Image: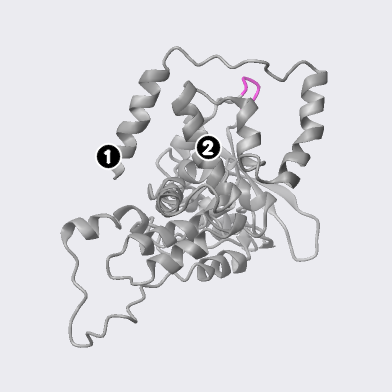
């Protein structure tokens, strides 16, 4: 069958555009197979990264039909089945573009400097400086090793970083790839700097609190690392060590849980006062809420009362059961 490949093209210091190539392909052909054919048979100037062709190295990550994926993993049949095409479309089309959140160097090749720099920022190496056992291996039990399975599957392809909305709006955020690696070190029984790591990952929006939980990193990860879940595990470790006075980010999470336990859902009247106003301790925070409060009152959107949900007791028991199991 014939398929059109609409490919993003850009030379240094030039305006980007899309160029379309038509190939006779089979449904089982991977997108990388097709890109190779375009380069070898139609246009030798097309630039893209590749290496193993077997979902191992992560080199061929790019945006395929609007989402970041590995070109060697996705095939023509699955891509065409993923989207419905209009009746007037005689030849189905697959759109290929470079990854996001990184500047384009040429065509589908991006500059991954920020990706690697942010990975380095979380110090992704096991520290054993406090264990002076030079003639022995640091052995782990199967249970200890199993805690590292998910994060250990990361191949650093950059798909999660490309789709990270938090990274798009906040350049200080290190990204889901870095924090997934960070979680591996937090859970690694051989590492002796857990407390220092948690303090580092707890710093402002560049650490775990910068994650907006949009789920995009989980959705596009080709290795099922689930970076958002790994970030959540680091948050939980921090929350277990900190009280509500430690920071607004920690207070946000603790207040949310407490209010849901009390009423089945969030009492919006209390949420801002407790989080931003720090339980009436932060005068500046309270004053910052006044303009919003006045606008809400003027528009009749400030609830005068709060009614707990019908399932409050069930919600409370579920939260307490989860908390008990974690302890």
Q: Position of residue 2 (x, y in %)?
A: 54, 37
Residue 139, image x, y percentages: 18, 71
Task: Tell me if 126 is positioned left or right of 79 in this view.
Answer: left
278 within the magenta span: no
Chief SS of the magenta region: loop
Residue on which the image places disc 2: 255
Q: Position of residue 219 (x, y in %)?
A: 47, 41
Does 208 sit left or right of 97 as displayed?
Answer: left
What scheme was used to colour the molecule? one colour
Which residue is found at the position 65% from the left and 40% from the top? 280
Residue 222 vertical placement versus 52 (above, below): above
- The residue that mark 1 highlights is 325
Q: Identify which residue is drawn at 32% across, 80% down.
A: 130
Q: Which element type, helix, strand or loop, lies under badge 1?
A: helix
Q: Residue at x 49, y 21 (%)?
A: 263
Of 296 and 52, nearer the camera is 296
Task: Give 16 or 237, whichever is nearer the viewer.
Answer: 237
Return the mark for residue 4: none
Residue 195 placement: quadrant = bottom left
Mark 1 and mark 2: Cα distance apart in space? 20 Å
Question: How many numbered circles are shown?
Answer: 2
**Res 262 seen here:** yes
The first of marks 1 and 2 along the sequence is: 2
Q: Is residue 257 left or right of residue 151?
A: right
In the image, taking residue 283 as reference, residue 275 lies left or right, namely left
Q: Nearer the viewer, residue 315 or 52?
A: 315
Q: What span is colored magenta in the figure? A: 86-90
Instruction: Name the residue at the bottom extreme.
Output: 134
The quarter of the image holding the C terminus is top left
Q: Residues within 10 Å of mark 1 (few under 14, many from 20)?
A: few
Residue drawn at x 52%, y 52% is: 159
Q: Is residue 215 visible?
A: no
């Amino acid at each position: 069958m014939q398929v059109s490949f609409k490919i993003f093209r850009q030379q240094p210091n030039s305006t980007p555009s899309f160029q379309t190539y038509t190939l006779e392909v089979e449904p089982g052909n991977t997108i990388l197979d097709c890109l190779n054919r375009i380069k070898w048979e139609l246009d030798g100037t097309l630039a893209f990264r590749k290496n193993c062709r077997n979902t191992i190295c992560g080199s061929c990550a790019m945006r395929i039909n609007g989402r970041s994926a590995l070109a060697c993993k996705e095939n023509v049949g699955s891509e065409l089945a993923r989207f419905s095409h209009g009746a007037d479309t005689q030849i189905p089309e697959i759109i290929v573009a470079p990854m996001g959140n990184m500047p384009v160097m040429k065509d589908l090749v991006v500059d991954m400097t920020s990706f690697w720099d942010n990975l380095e920022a979380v110090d992704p190496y096991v520290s054993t400086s406090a264990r002076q056992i030079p003639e022995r291996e640091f052995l782990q039990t199967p249970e200890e090793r199993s805690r590292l399975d998910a994060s250990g599957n990361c191949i650093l392809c950059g798909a999660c970083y490309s789709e990270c909305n938090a990274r798009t709006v906040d350049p200080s955020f290190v990204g889901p790839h870095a924090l997934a690696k960070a979680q591996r070190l937090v859970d690694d029984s051989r590492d002796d700097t857990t407390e220092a790591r948690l303090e580092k990952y707890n710093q402002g929006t560049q650490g775990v609190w910068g994650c907006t939980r949009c789920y995009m990193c989980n959705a596009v990860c080709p290795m099922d690392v689930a970076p958002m879940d790994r970030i959540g595990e680091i948050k939980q470790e921090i929350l277990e060590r900190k009280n509500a006075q430690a920071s607004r980010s920690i207070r946000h999470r603790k207040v949310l849980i407490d209010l849901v336990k009390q009423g089945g859902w969030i009492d919006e009247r209390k949420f801002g006062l407790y989080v931003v106003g720090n339980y009436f301790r932060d005068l500046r925070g309270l004053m910052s809420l006044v303009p919003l409060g006045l606008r809400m009152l003027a528009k009749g959107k400030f609830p005068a009362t709060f009614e707990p949900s019908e399932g409050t007791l069930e919600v409370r028991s579920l939260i307490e059961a989860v908390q008990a199991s974690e302890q």
